[in-house]
Image (cartoon, grey):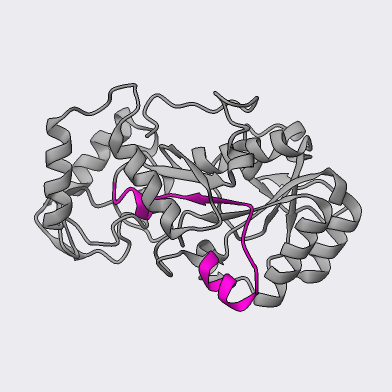
């Protein structure tokens, strides 16, 4: 009786599972949602990925967002190779990080300063800490269906109503953390108004994806966004745009530029970016006005740091 020889991908997955939890370094790569064995990629070129067996695939995912220019663009390769010759990490400021910050600020006029970090989760986590430090408040609002990374305070789903606490979406998230996170229905003005009526003076910020990428790209309606801006201003809570997915993708000025066209004077108080700005490198950022950003160390009392930031 013949036995089927395991494919190269199967063999690599079996090997990976012995040394890496689940065989992957991010759960979505395990293929559990679609079945089968993960494909182990050896190289990429333009719109294509090539696996360990030499099979070619059209890359519709773009490394989950960053590869907006495709893989191996000659100009990108040249810039990366040139920079690599100068060294990888210095633990000190560089002129290149100034240039990147200047370019980001040119395109996003709602921000006057920006801090560079290494991941979207790090950026959203830091943005919430900064909002809390600026306002002296603990609670914040997020919306069902939006994904902001895997920080404890963000792994919370809605409870049975605004009078009840939410529930962790991961083991290891303490109840003490959950009680500060309010989770509302996306695009519900009624829930938004109720939440601000009950907790407005306790809210440090409201974090929202202007286009919710993990629930089929639902866009926040203009009336909802207009009311959200009004309530944040009224109660002194910071409006934080998570543009990790939408930043420099849906428009050069990011999603907030589209809302600024529809709502006169509209701007978020703080913005978070990732994916596209790194082009495949581990890079993210968060920014706001100078008055808010100067609350960060080394100028202010809100601590944020990173060995590889910049």
Q: Which residues are magenta?
A: 256-280
Number of marks present in the image shown = 0
Quarter of the image where the C terminus is located: top left
Asked if residue 275 is among those painted magenta in the image, a careful observer would answer yes
Name the residue: 63% across, 44% down. 154
Observer-nearest of 194 and 92: 92
131 on left or right of 159: left
Name the residue: 46% across, 64% down. 254
Q: Is residue 28 visible?
A: yes
44 on left or right of 112: left
Figure quadrant of residue 97 = top left
Q: Is residue 190 above or below residue 107?
A: below
Q: Is residue 7 visible?
A: no
Name the residue: 39% across, 24% down. 307
Name the residue: 39% across, 61% down. 34
217 on left or right of 281: right
Q: Position of residue 264 (x, y in %)?
A: 65, 74
Q: Position of residue 184 (x, y in %)?
A: 74, 59
Q: Position of residue 230 (x, y in %)?
A: 77, 64
105 on left or right of 19: right
Q: Is residue 79 above or below residue 44?
A: above
Observer-nearest of 115 and 277: 115
Q: Position of residue 153 (x, y in %)?
A: 66, 40
């Amino acid at each position: 009786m013949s036995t089927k020889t395991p494919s190269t991908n199967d063999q690599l997955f079996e090997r990976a599972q012995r040394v890496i939890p689940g065989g992957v370094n991010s759960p979505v790569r395990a293929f559990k949602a679609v079945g089968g064995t993960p494909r182990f990629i050896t190289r990429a070129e333009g719109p294509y990925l090539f696996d360990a067996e030499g099979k070619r695939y059209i890359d519709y995912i773009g490394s989950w967002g960053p590869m907006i220019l495709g893989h191996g663009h000659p100009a990108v390769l040249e810039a990366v190779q040139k920079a690599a010759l100068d060294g990888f990490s210095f633990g000190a400021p560089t002129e290149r990080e100034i240039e990147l910050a200047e370019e980001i600020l040119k395109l996003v006029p709602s921000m006057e300063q920006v801090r560079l970090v290494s991941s979207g989760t790090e950026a959203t986590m830091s943005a919430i800490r900064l909002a809390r430090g600026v306002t002296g408040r603990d609670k914040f609002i997020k919306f069902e269906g939006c994904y902001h990374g895997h920080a404890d305070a963000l792994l919370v789903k809605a409870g049975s109503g605004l009078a009840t606490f939410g529930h962790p979406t991961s083991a290891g998230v303490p109840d003490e953390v959950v009680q500060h996170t309010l989770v509302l229905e996306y695009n519900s003005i009624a829930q938004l108004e109720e939440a601000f009526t009950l907790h407005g003076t306790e809210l440090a910020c409201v974090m929202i994806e202007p286009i919710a990428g993990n629930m089929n790209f639902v866009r926040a309606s203009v009336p909802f966004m207009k009311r959200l801006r009004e309530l944040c201003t009224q109660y002194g809570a910071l409006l934080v745009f998570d543009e990790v997915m939408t930043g420099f993708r849906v428009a050069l000025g990011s999603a907030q530029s589209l809302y600024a066209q529809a709502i006169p004077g509209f701007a978020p108080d703080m913005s978070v970016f990732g994916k596209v700005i790194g082009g495949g490198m581990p890079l993210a950022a968060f920014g706001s006005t100078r008055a808010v950003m100067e609350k960060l160390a080394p100028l202010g009392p809100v601590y944020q740091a990173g060995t590889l930031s910049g």
